[in-house]
Amino acid sequence: MDIVFASGFGPEQTLTDSSSAFSYGRWLLFIVGAVVALVVHLTKATARPVANVATAGIAAPVLSVGEDATSLALSLAAILAPVIALVLLAFTVFGLACLVTRRRRRGERKRLEAMDF
């Protein structure tokens, strides 16, 4: 049985040997992902019954909207963070270029003023 991995960027990859998925330390990524998913699930599974009992079920829609909003915010952050980083990098490079240009002009002015006496 083959498993096909495909994304919007680049060629698809076919995994014919399951042992190759865990080579080169990739198993660590699987473990970290499983632990994160488990922690999130256990937190929700613990908080939901407590909130439902404490508020007679009124908190369920509020928790659901909160979970959806958090999910949306984190998804957008994952998409926008690289774009924001590139914009900040561009502003930083532009700012440094302006600063260097300004300092060079000041140095040239001082040299010209020193020559005029």
Image: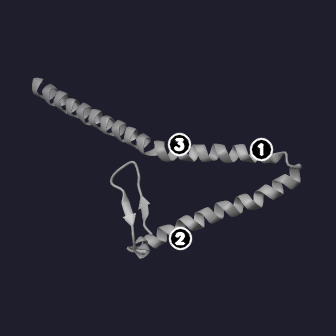
Amino acid residing under circle 2? Ile
On residue 99, which mark appears? Answer: none
Q: Give left or right: position of 11 versus 53.
A: left
Residue 8: % across, % down: 39, 48
**Residue 61: assigned label:** 1
Say the numbered circle drawn on residue 76: 3
| 92, 83: nearer the viewer | 83
Evaluate if marks 2 and 1 touch, with contact meaning CB atoms under 8 Å apart.
Answer: no
Image coordinates of residue 48 in percent, x first then y, are 78, 55
Mark 3 packing: few (<14 Cα in 10 Å), some, or many (20+)?
few
Residue 87 lies, with reference to residue 24, above or below; the image says: above
| Residue assigned mark 2 | 31
Q: Residues within 10 Å of mark 1 (few under 14, many from 20)?
A: few
Cα–Cα span, label 2 and label 3: 25 Å
What residue is shown at x 38% (from left), y 63% (from top)?
14
Indicate the position of residue 112 as horizontal and vertical percent values. 13, 26
Disc 1 secondary structure class: helix
**Residue found at x 22% / y 30%:** 106
Q: Secondary structure at mark 2?
A: helix
First-in-chain label (2 vs 3): 2
Front-most of residues 94 and 81: 81
Separation of disc 3 and disc 1 at Cα? 22 Å
**In the displayed structure, would residue 66 be above or below residue 4?**
above
